[in-house]
Image: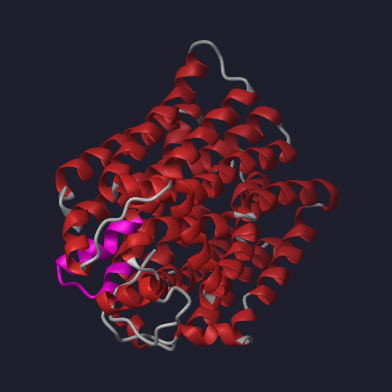
């Protein structure tokens, strides 16, 4: 368990470096906000494709081995970016291609790591809600550390050379998984569920995962909500935040502070959720956290507040956001049977990421045409309205905590795919 969480944290810290460096490099190299938005499309589209089609491969190959292979392949792809820039040159199309390939390979690896978590938590007899809180806290810590390292490496190494650090984190993550995560994790879980390992065609497995996802009103509602908020967040992180940071600081280094602030707040929020989050009402918690974490950062930037105030707003937004991922992970782990876990999670990843390319591209277009401040105001208002949607609709009633064992759920869901079980023990998913 510790090895898996450590590997996730290490690779996510590297991803945070790339997340900050690439948009700033494109903005500095081209001077074009629209080009920055285009780069965002190439960052996010592979997440959609990798999540959709990689989940079945992860189920077939195994969670552990898939995670290791994905880390190695992604690390090599990221390493090529500074190597090409230092040798034969790095035209814009080559940068986009490598960024695309890295994301395409990384998405199944992220799914595989997430799919391993319930098995290891069950083997260690840990409450899944608390494990999800710990996982989210580690991911937030990794983002905060990665953002801080990015701020320093931009000054000391330059933009593209900073990607060497990301490549190194992928290598370390793969090594930690190889050494610390037991090879028998998949076999043990299969024995516990009592389900024989069935062999079927790729497209049959793919369609089964898609049908399961579509047949659940609660999962559909979650995917739609997060898809829209991710669309907005993509525009913010890839376009609006970097452009705003460049207007305040010449080198855009404020962006690292903004990301670190929101990650630091989210670390605290995730830790608090792991402590007592299982006692909170799920629907109310979800709405309040989304509302407080979404709109305030955009409205604070639009108001032009002083930097200390801005970073405080970002930190408080992160505090509210810290409970969202572990809460949703718990719900998803309760709903999805193990034998199709990776493909359903991959489908969810695809669904929630579907709007991200549109968001980053639309963000670039709106800033170019309407200006930064009007775009920030419109973004904040839209975010606030969207996050209220869980207050309406019957499907969100399924957020109620469940109490039946995971084994019983797996049996029910495999024999009655359209059934909506009333309960599940603390076994979750992210």
Most foreground residue, 124 or 184:
184
The image quadrant that residue 354 belongs to is bottom right
Residue found at the very far right of the displayed protein: 369
Left or right, 92 with reference to 57: right
Q: Is residue 372 above or below residue 176?
A: below
Give the x, y percent position of residue 70.
Answer: 36, 39
Quarter the C terminus occupies: bottom left
Q: Main secondary structure of the magenta part?
A: helix
Query: Which residues make up the magenta segment?
Result: 114-132
Most foreground residue, 302 or 125:
125
Give the x, y percent position of residue 426.
Answer: 28, 78
* Residue drawn 20% across the image and 62% down it: 189
Residue found at the very far top of the displayed protein: 88
Quarter the N terminus occupies: bottom left
Q: Is residue 304 above or below residue 133?
A: above
Left or right, 370 with reference to 62: right
Give the x, y percent position of residue 296.
Answer: 62, 70
* Residue drawn 42% across the image and 50% down it: 56
Magenta includes 69?
Answer: no
Q: Is residue 146 visible?
A: no
Give the x, y percent position of residue 22.
Answer: 55, 36
Left or right, 105 with reference to 375: left
């Amino acid at each position: 368990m510790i090895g898996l969480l450590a590997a996730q944290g290490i690779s996510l810290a590297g991803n945070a470096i790339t997340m900050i460096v690439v948009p700033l490099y494109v903005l500095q190299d081209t001077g074009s906000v629209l080009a920055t938005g285009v780069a965002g499309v190439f960052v996010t589209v592979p997440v959609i494709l990798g999540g959709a089609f990689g989940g079945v491969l992860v189920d077939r190959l195994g969670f552990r081995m898939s995670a290791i292979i994905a880390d190695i392949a992604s690390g090599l792809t990221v390493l090529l970016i500074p190597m090409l820039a230092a040798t034969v040159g790095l035209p814009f199309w080559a940068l986009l291609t490598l960024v695309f390939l890295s994301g395409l390979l990384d998405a199944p690896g992220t799914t595989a790591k997430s799919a391993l978590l319930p098995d290891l938590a069950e083997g260690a007899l840990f409450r899944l809600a608390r494990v999800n809180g710990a996982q989210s806290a580690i991911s937030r810590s990794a983002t905060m550390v990665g953002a801080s390292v990015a701020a320093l490496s931009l000054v000391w190494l330059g933009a593209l050379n900073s990607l060497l650090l990301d490549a190194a984190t992928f290598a370390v993550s793969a090594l930690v998984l190889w050494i610390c995560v037991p090879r028998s994790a998949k076999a043990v879980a299969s024995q516990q569920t009592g389900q024989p390992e069935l062999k079927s065609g790729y497209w049959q497995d793919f369609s089964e995962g898609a049908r399961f996802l579509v047949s659940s009103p609660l999962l559909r509602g979650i995917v739609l909500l997060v898809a829209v908020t991710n669309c907005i967040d993509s525009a913010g992180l890839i376009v609006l935040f970097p452009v705003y940071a460049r207007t305040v600081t010449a080198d855009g280094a404020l962006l690292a502070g903004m990301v670190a602030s929101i990650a630091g707040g989210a670390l605290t929020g995730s830790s608090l959720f792991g402590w007592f989050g299982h006692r909170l009402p799920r629907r109310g918690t979800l709405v309040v956290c989304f509302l407080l974490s979404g709109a305030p950062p955009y409205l604070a930037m639009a108001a032009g507040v002083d930097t200390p105030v801005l970073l405080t707003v970002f930190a408080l937004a992160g505090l509210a956001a810290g409970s969202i991922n572990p809460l949703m992970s718990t719900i998803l782990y309760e709903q999805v049977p193990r034998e199709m876990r990776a493909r359903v999670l991959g489908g969810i990843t695809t669904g929630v990421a579907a709007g991200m390319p549109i968001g980053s591209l639309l963000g670039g277009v709106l800033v170019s045409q309407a200006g930064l401040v009007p775009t920030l105001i419109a973004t904040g208002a839209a975010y606030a309205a969207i996050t209220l949607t869980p207050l309406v609709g019957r499907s969100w009633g399924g957020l109620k905590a469940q109490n039946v064992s995971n084994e019983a759920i797996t049996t029910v869901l495999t024999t009655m795919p359209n059934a909506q079980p009333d309960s599940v023990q603390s076994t979750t998913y992210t």
